[in-house]
Image (cartoon, helix red, strand yellow):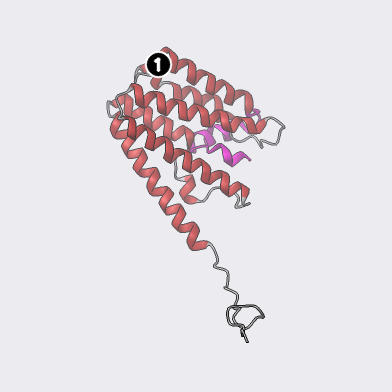
Amino acid sequence: MRFLRDDGHLARLLGRLAGGALPPLPPAAAAALVTGVLLAAGLGAATGITLFAPVAALLLAGAASAHPHGGRHDPLAVPLLRGAEYLYLLALGTGGGVPGPLVFVLLVVVALHHCGTVCRARQGAGPPDRAARAALGWDGRMLLAAAGGALGWLPFAFGALTGYLAVLLAYGAVAGWARTPVADLADTGDEPGGAGASTT
C-alpha cells in the first residue's frame, strides 16, 4: 500500500529520517489543506507564496512516507496526495500563463502514471519498476513545476515535464509488454467441433 503514495526521493528521505513513526493520514491531510490555502492566498498565480506550497507539502507529508500504512484509514492518504498534486499543477499552470492544452495534457499524463501504479498493485506486481520510480514522485513533480515558476520558465517546465513523463509511460508500457509471456495458442484443428473437424 505504501508505494501507492508515489513518493519521490526527497519524500522517501524524510520518511527514513522520521523512522516511520508518523501515521500517514494527518500529515497528508495537512499537506493537502496547506496546499489549498497557499493556492487560494496566491490566487493561483506563480507568486512566492504559491511556489512555496510544494515545500510545505513535502515537509508535512514526506515525513510519513516510511510508515507501513497498515492502519484502517491510512489508505486515505493516497487520494489526498493525488488531489494536492492535481490541484497544484492545475492552479499553477492556469495562473502562470501556461497554455490550457499543455496543462491538460500534463494532468492526463500524471493521471496515467497513477493508474499504472494502481494496476500494478491490483495485479500483485509489487513495488514500481525503474520507469515508475523515475517519474520523480508527487513531490518531485510539484517542486519541478515550482522551480520553473520561480525562474520564469513555467511553460517550459510544464512542457519538459509532460514530455519526460510521456516517454517514461511509453517505455514502461513497451517493457511491460516485452516481459509478458505469450500463451501458446491451443491447436483445435483436430478436436471435435474445431475448425478442422469433418463436416461429413
In terms of depth relative to the viewer, which is nearer, 86 or 11?
Answer: 86
- Helix, strand or loop under label 1: helix
Which residues make up the magenta segment? 1-24
Badge 1 density bin: few <14, some 14–19, many ≥20, Cα 10 Å = some
The reply to whether residue 127 is in sight is no
Q: Which residue is depicted at the point 66% across and 37% down?
A: 68
Q: Position of residue 31 (x, y in %)?
A: 53, 23
Q: Position of residue 147 (x, y in %)?
A: 35, 28
- From the viewer's side, name the closer residue of 137 and 169: 169
Residue visible at 46% across and 58% down? 175
The residue where tag 1 is placed is 49
Q: Residue at x 57, y 31 (%)?
A: 79
Along the line of sight, the residue nearer the viewer: 103 or 5: 103
Q: Is residue 181 above or below residue 42?
A: below
Residue lying at the far front of the rendered structure? 200
**Of all residues shown, which one is farthest toward the bottom?**
200
> The residue under label 1 is which amino acid type?
Ile
- Is residue 161 highlighted in magenta? no
Above or below 68: residue 177:
below
In this view of the protein, can residue 57 be seen by the observer? yes
Left or right of 117 on screen, residue 19: right
23 in magenta: yes
Is residue 32 placed above or below 175 in the rendered structure? above
Q: Position of residue 21 (x, y in %)?
A: 66, 30
Quarter of the picture holding the C terminus? bottom right
Q: Name the image quarter holding residue 158.
A: top left
Residue ID at (48%, 15%):
37
Position of residue 78 measured from the top left corner of the image (x, y, whole percent): 58, 33
Quadrant in the picture for the N terminus: top right
